[in-house]
Image (cartoon, grey):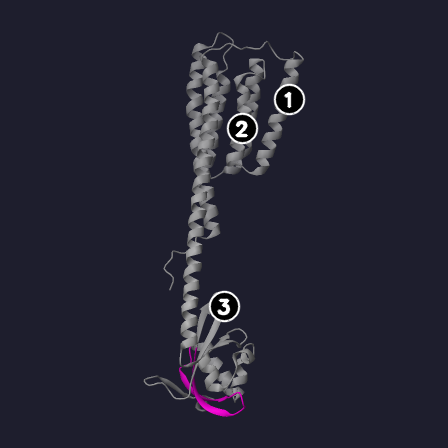
Amino acid sequence: MLDSRPLDDPSEIRRFQSSARTRSLKSVLLFIAALMAPLTAVDIWMAPPGDSRAVISMSMTLLALWSYLMLKRKRSDLMRLPLVVGILFLGSWAMYSYGSVRASSSFSLIASVVLAGSFLSLRYVAVTLLASMGILGALTWAEASGRMGPPSFVADVRYWMMASVILAVVGALLYYVRGATDEAHVRRLNQMEDRLRLEFERDQSLRRFGRIFRLNPTALLIQLASTQTVLEVNPAFERSLGYEAERIVGRPAGSLWATDLHWREHLRVLFEKGSTGWQQVLWLRANGQAIDVWVYSELSEDHSGMLITTTVAERLPGGAETAGTLEAAV
């Protein structure tokens, strides 16, 4: 019996990966909220009159918390679209309020694409990418044609904090994605090692069984349970009954029995109990001669399906339990 642990079920692997992805996204959303909240306070405190953009950072904080709450309630369907649309809208609003696509807020478009690519479906990645390119093109045209306000490129703490927050978010996304990728890679390596070990142990068992089967002095016959077709016989079987392995493999096992009724009763007992016990029956040698033999069949399972292993002896083995003759049974 193989001692390796069983391979993970593919559906279980997918559930594990989905759960890990959800946990990572929750952490990123809390990280965004934790960074945007102090940015809101700094913006209110340091912004000149009429130049505060705290409402944008506060909206981003609320959006991150809303998305986290939806994930916690297992309502990701109410999280995906608002999150993507919200980030794109707030990033566009920030660039417009700064009066230029060259503002640090333009990095938020990059962050939105990375976020979608890390945790959402490929459809959301494509939509987010196309929307970001469209928004960037529209705002570039608006700035070039003078349709935006005067650009503000004041290098202050607010600029540094906004750029740092976006960089931190992108870094967090890459950190969690890299961690998830490494974990999935390790799981695949473990799966591959387990599979190779199982195959090696199976091959060893097959080789060991093959040696025992060939060297066994008792006549043995293996047949497929579904069709009762002979799959293999050992040399002792060839010597006892005069059949050559090449000529008997592929034939119905019932053709070895002198009486079809006894063969059918033998099968009935086998499929009903899993084994037949020793039964005295008439078999046919290769030359057509009917001989008295004792047969014992049992069911076993193999990677190729259910098999029947039949042991044939001219005399009842010492100490063996007998099921009697089939003439009495039928």
What is the C-alpha distance between the residues marked 1 and 3? 63 Å
Tell me the residue that label 3 is attached to.
305
First in sequence: mark 2 vs mark 3: 2
Q: Secondary structure at mark 3?
A: strand
Say which residue appears at 41% left-offset and 61% top-offset: 201
Res. 137 mark: 1
In the image, residue 158 lies at what x, y percent?
46, 14
Say which residue appears at 48% left-offset and 19% top-offset: 163
Tell me the residue that label 2 is attached to.
112
Q: Cβ–Cβ below 8 Å for labels 1 and 3?
A: no
Which amino acid is tagged 2? Ser
**On the image, which quarter does residue 183 sit in?**
top left
Q: Cβ–Cβ below 8 Å for labels 2 and 1?
A: no
| Magenta stretch, residue numbers | 275-297
Say which residue appears at 46% left-offset and 28% top-offset: 171
In the image, residue 311 lies at what x, y percent?
43, 81
For residue 130, above or below residue 197: above
For residue 63, above or below residue 313: above
For residue 253, above or below residue 142: below
What is the C-alpha distance between the residues marked 2 and 3? 52 Å
Say which residue appears at 42% left-offset and 54% top-offset: 194
One can see residue 72 in this view:
no
Q: Secondary structure at mark 2?
A: helix
